[in-house]
Image (spheres, helix red, strand yellow):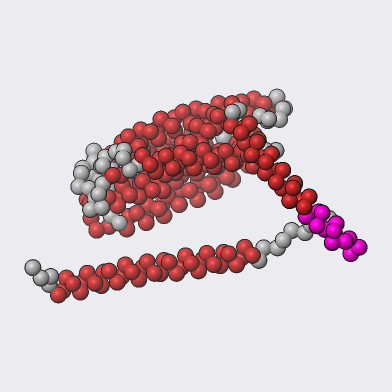
């Protein structure tokens, strides 16, 4: 059966529009990356503390270069060894649970949740455009939370626990609304989407609200985790932050793997469990840090 000419022209116009949009986005991102690279090269190199005198020979310069390279290698090896030592300390093990939760929910709001929104056919023709809008509101939540809690952390007499508590409450509210608003098979739906029903009538407004809450809660955890790591390991910041990124990245990768197989409510349950125990472990470390500060001692693990 032949296709009407009008439908063919409409499909061709729609396809050309998509290609034009992709080309525009690609060109824009390419230009931005090139500008960023150029600006990076324009950064002034810091002045060396020891300026070479005119009477120094080339042999002395080569010797200094070799010694500098050896020192850098030694520092890297020392940082690697300290990372292993930090892994087995009580504080880092407790904070690793919180870090693991941030990795799981990072995968959820950056990859899984947008897929769920785009898979709901009941959202109509706007289901795909809602994915971009969801990312925008996640970013708004991240920026708002990072700015607010970053400023409050400088003059916060109550410590970090209230911010983390707010973050987990915001995430639990978001998870509950997502559980009610999204079909269970949304993460593993086929390309054509899903027509399954949720516990309530799926609402675009609730979906976007959850995006904002996910970003806001994530900023609560990340700002306070970075703050407490910088405080506990001020003299060993490189190994501490290396462990933080390693645990977070591993858990994010694991979440990406099981997100292709688990229904939505099971993924939410995993994050609720890790979020609960991660919050408790963060509270424990923060209370110990506050106790050391109250006694006027430096809180250091190694």
User: Would you say residue 244 sits in the magenta stretch?
Assistant: no
Main secondary structure of the magenta stretch: helix
The answer to whether residue 88 shows anywhere in this view is yes
Q: Residue furthest front?
A: 59
Q: In x, y percent, where is residue 274?
A: 43, 32
In the rendered image, residue 51, in percent from the top left (x then y), is placed at 84, 59
Quadrant including the C terminus: top right
Frontmost residue, 23 versus 157 = 23
Point out the image quarter for the N terminus: bottom left
Q: Residue furthest left?
A: 1
Residue segment shown in magenta = 53-65
* Residue 169 screen position, x and y as percent: 43, 35
Quadrant position of residue 242: top right
Residue at 61% over, 65% down: 39
Residue at horizontal 33 percent and vertical 49 percent from the top: 115
Residue at 21 percent across and 42 percent down: it is 197
What's the residue at 53%, 47% (across, down)? 146
Q: Quadrant of residue 285?
A: top right
Where residue 248 appears, as percent x and y from the top left, is: 50, 40
In this view, the residue in front, 81 or 286, is 81
Number of numbered markers:
0
Residue 56 drawn in magenta: yes
User: In this view of the protein, can residue 224 be seen by the observer?
Assistant: no
């Amino acid at each position: 059966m032949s296709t009407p000419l009008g439908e063919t022209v409409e499909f061709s116009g729609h396809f050309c529009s998509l290609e034009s949009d992709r080309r525009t986005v690609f060109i824009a991102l390419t230009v931005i990356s090139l500008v960023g690279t150029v600006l990076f090269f324009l950064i002034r190199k810091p002045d060396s503390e020891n300026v070479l005198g005119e009477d120094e020979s080339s042999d002395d310069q080569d010797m200094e270069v070799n010694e500098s390279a050896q020192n850098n290698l030694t520092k890297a090896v020392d940082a690697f060894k300290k990372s292993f030592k930090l892994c087995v300390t009580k504080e880092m093990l407790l904070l690793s649970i919180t870090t693991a939760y941030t990795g799981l929910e990072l995968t959820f709001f950056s990859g899984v949740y947008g897929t769920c929104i785009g898979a709901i056919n009941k959202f109509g023709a706007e289901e795909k455009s809602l994915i971009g809008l969801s990312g925008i509101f996640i970013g708004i939540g991240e920026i708002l939370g990072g700015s607010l809690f970053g400023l409050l952390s400088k003059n916060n007499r109550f410590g970090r626990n209230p911010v983390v508590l707010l973050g987990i409450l915001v995430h639990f509210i978001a998870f509950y609304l997502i559980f009610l608003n999204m079909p269970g098979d949304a993460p593993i739906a086929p390309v054509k989407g899903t027509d399954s029903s949720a516990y309530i009538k799926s609402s675009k407004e609730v979906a976007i609200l959850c995006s904002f809450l996910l970003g806001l809660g994530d900023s609560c955890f990340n700002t306070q985790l970075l703050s407490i790591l910088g405080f506990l390991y001020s003299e060993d910041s490189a190994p501490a932050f290396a462990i933080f990124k390693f645990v977070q990245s591993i858990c994010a990768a694991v979440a990406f793997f099981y997100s292709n197989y688990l229904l939505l409510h099971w993924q939410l349950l995993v994050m609720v469990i890790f979020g609960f125990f991660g919050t408790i472990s963060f509270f424990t470390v923060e209370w110990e840090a506050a106790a050391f500060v109250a006694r006027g001692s430096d809180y250091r693990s190694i």
